[in-house]
Image (cartoon, grey):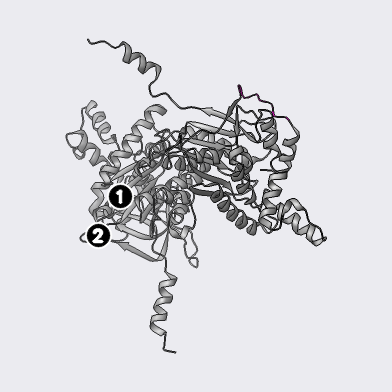
Amino acid sequence: MNRQNILGLMAAAAPADGGEVVVVKDERGQPHRGKVFAAVHAHLDDVPYYASGLCAKLMSEGYTGYIVRTSNDEKYGGRSTAQNILSNEEDHFRMAAALGFKDVFDFYYQNHEMNGISYLDLRGRLILIFRFLKVDTVLSFNPWGHGEDDSDHWVTGRAVDEACWMAGMPNDFHEHLDAGIQPHRVSERYYFCARPEQPFNRVVDIRSHLEKKIDAIVECKSRGDGNRGSLVRAQLAKQGKRLALLGNDDRTADRAYARQFLLDEDREHGKQHKLEFAERFYYIDQRRPAKSKAEEYIEKNAVRI
Amino acid sequence: MERRRFLGRSVAGGLALGGAAALQGQRSNLPPAVTPTAYAVPKGEYNAYLTPDYHTYASDLVIERDQPGKPHQGKVLAAIQAHSDDITLFAAGTVAKLINEGYTGYLIRVSNDEKAGRTVGHGVVQNEIDNQEAAKALGCKKAYSFYYRNHRMDDCAMIEIRQRLMFLFRLLQVNTVFAMDPYDHYDENPDHIVVGKAVESASWMASPGGGHEYPEQLKAGLKHCQIRERYYHCRSPQGHNLVNRVVDISSYIDRKVRANVANKGKGPAGDNGMRLRQELARQGKKLPLLGNDDDTANFQYTKHFLMEDFRVLGKQFGLEYAETFRYIGQEPNLRQAVRKYVDGHAVPL
């Protein structure tokens, strides 16, 4: 996530050129029990801003969630490169715990340098994870999304896109089968709407998951402004001032700041569909029917010889 | 190994005895005060070019001989080759020896060998079969193939190959690896160099000493492995490497021959004995050496003409047949050494 782009995003109206837009609301009970999703992002604050409402929604409806961070976030944190890597790592674990992810995978490819890595290495790692976790659904960057100026984003999105279908091919990394890890195709994808010109066909109502989203954002201290509220509070205190909005402690200040200033994009997205807060995605459904048309035809028309 | 090169040299020399012999008998112009740092490897009578032109020998060279019983029971070796004929030509005797002494063996081929065959399609199919058959001949439990494109592996992501090797090393709990020496001088084949380097780095990264490498493999149920021994072989004829281990393969020469005969699509052995026998028959002739059937012809052709270089190599060390390696054994364990020192020197306060 790039804060400068967030600000740009807020000012622009996203065109819905992803086909018919479907508004997705909460489902009752646990309709997704037994299913698994993986949220694959490049940086600590990508999922929190683009998709943490959906992640919280899916997990509340029965999904088991896993999160994969591909970069090491070394360029953010305001300290030395090494200290930035550590602080982002710690933030990532805390953010994942706040959202309820079952496990965290960090790949630590060099931040802002991912267009120079071996993309095949990244794809191979994702294939293994998709297979052994039996991932049904992924959330990640749109590999075809225009306006994406962060190479870490598009490299991650492209690798995810290919890993989704290759994970189902037995001749790709066939050695996995010897470890008892079977081919497993990922059949549903939610691509982030990370830049103003990127398409979307799903608007997800995240109102009932807003507190979880704030939980996630405030853990993004090394990057993502998660501690901006407490920093502002401390700065004002030095000047002998206070802001009533920020309350009397850092935790309250961070949450209040996030709620007041960092969710405008979700408010804007929701407003267009008469929702309070919403996240946008380009959704691809590749689930296959239990029986193909050909199988149905054969079953219906086959006669005894 | 490159088949065309082998054939080209054989034809040019006409299985030429004179050329090789003359070369070996050549007087050195090295001044008396200069100690050579590489030694010309004597060639066999048929000069199959299966041993390198030069060897550089280490002062602590060891001859590894047959061991009675199954001293390696419970251990696992992986023999990694770029092409279906690399291990069979240069290390098959030693691989067969270690398996017979208790190792469980696996053969891993990294390329698809597409450049050796009537068409690319026929080539990859035949070499795929050959890899399986060579593994059986060596006594390996299983053969793997990664199918990267032949002769183009310098265009592959070496880090992906390394990732896959680490996966297999951890899955199979490999203790010992065989591969082309990544420091084999003057090797012309990019596939060899890429595979050698990938094996070299995968060997230590797959172990706990490799740190946090591919932790998702561990989460998927694999465990770190401990690769403590590496046998690096050279290629021939142009390559040469540092040799610190000579392995007596006399008891396993027939296994080595069988493994090479299994390589129908590539390499100098395969069905060449059968073809020679058929060609002679068409001329109304026969060679008693080749026997009365195709299998015997292939075996005898390979043993007599191709293994000769390994016989001559062995003769230098008083062995019937030998293979040579840069061997890297278990590294010293600092913690154990310190513990031993502490145990021996600690006194009451």
Image disc number at residue B105? 1
> Alpha-carbon neighbours of circle 1 within 10 Å: few (<14), some, or many (≥20)?
many
Task: Write down the chain letter for disc 2.
Answer: B
Residue plotted at (42% across, 33% down): A169
Most distant residue in the right direction: A239
The quadrant the N terminus of chain B occupies is: top left
Image disc number at residue B65? none
Figure label count = 2
The range drawn in magenta is A13-20
Task: Write down the chain letter for disc 1.
Answer: B
Disc 1 and disc 2 on one polypeptide chain: yes
Kind of residue sitting beneath label 1: Gly
Q: CA distance from mark 1 to mark 2?
A: 17 Å
Question: Residue A204 sits in which quadrant?
Answer: top right
Where is mark 2, residue-wise? B66
Specify whether residue B283 is painted magenta: no
